[in-house]
Image: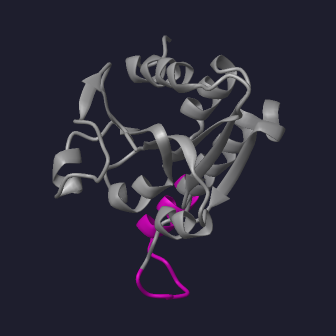
Amino acid sequence: MPAPAYYETLRSLLLQIHRPGKPLVAVEVGAGNGELSKYLLTKVPGLFLHMIDHWRPIYRDAQVERTEEQQKEIDRQSDLFKAACKATDFTTERRKIWRMDPLLAVREFGNFETDLIYLASADGVSAWWPKVRARGILCGQSQDVKVALGTTLRNAKPIQRKGGLWFTYRIE
């Protein structure tokens, strides 16, 4: 089965912004089963990828007993985590797995800047934007990105769309 079109769009964007002699670093927020991670790590030589996902359901209460439906979601998230690890085990030195809420992970990044950040959903656009380096890219697949942005991102080019992906460049 061929990869979705946006996988190739991401690959070409990464190659386009790569600076010779500099490390190429990307963040995938919402890594899920690791298929996109595997594709990028296979197709983009030298890429270092931060894979971020909570890989566990978020329940507001800390009840000990779960409903059958809640337990199925716990099992599903656990299976996704195992699949993501397995999909990228061929290059553990080129990836870091962050098993935590993405909005907590962004805080852990501190002043670190990255070349490209891919968001699986439109959540956290404004939180992740400061982590994109100058001439770097913030992108995602969500159709509701303009709603998530609310206001224009500072120092961003207008949003573009290609291959099922939206993206913007940081211009400072």
Q: State how the image is colored.
A: one colour
Q: Is residue 135 visible?
A: yes
The image quadrant of residue 53 is bottom right
* Residue at 63% over, 61% down: 99
Nearest the viewer among 68 and 25 is 25
In the image, is residue 66 part of the stretch drawn in magenta? yes
Which quadrant of the rendered structure holds the C terminus? top left
Q: Is residue 31 visible?
A: no
* Residue at 57% over, 45% down: 114
Image position, residue 18 (x, y; %): 59, 25
Number of dots carrying numbers: 0
Q: Residue furthest top?
A: 2
Image position, residue 117 (x, y; %): 48, 43
In the image, is residue 67 part of the stretch drawn in magenta? yes
Left of 126 or right of it: where is 79?
A: right
Image position, residue 138 (x, y; %): 40, 41
Left of 67 or right of it: where is 14?
A: right
* Residue at 28% over, 41% down: 142
Q: Residue furthest front?
A: 172
Image position, residue 146 (x, y; %): 17, 47
Nearest the viewer among 170 and 83 is 170
The relative height of residue 141 versus residue 101 in the rendered view (above or below) is above
The relative height of residue 70 versus residue 11 in the rendered view (above or below) is below
* Residue at 53% over, 44% down: 28
The relative height of residue 86 versus residue 2 in the rendered view (above or below) is below
Nearest the viewer among 96 and 84 is 96
The image quadrant of residue 168 is top left
* Span highlighted in magenta in the image: 60-76
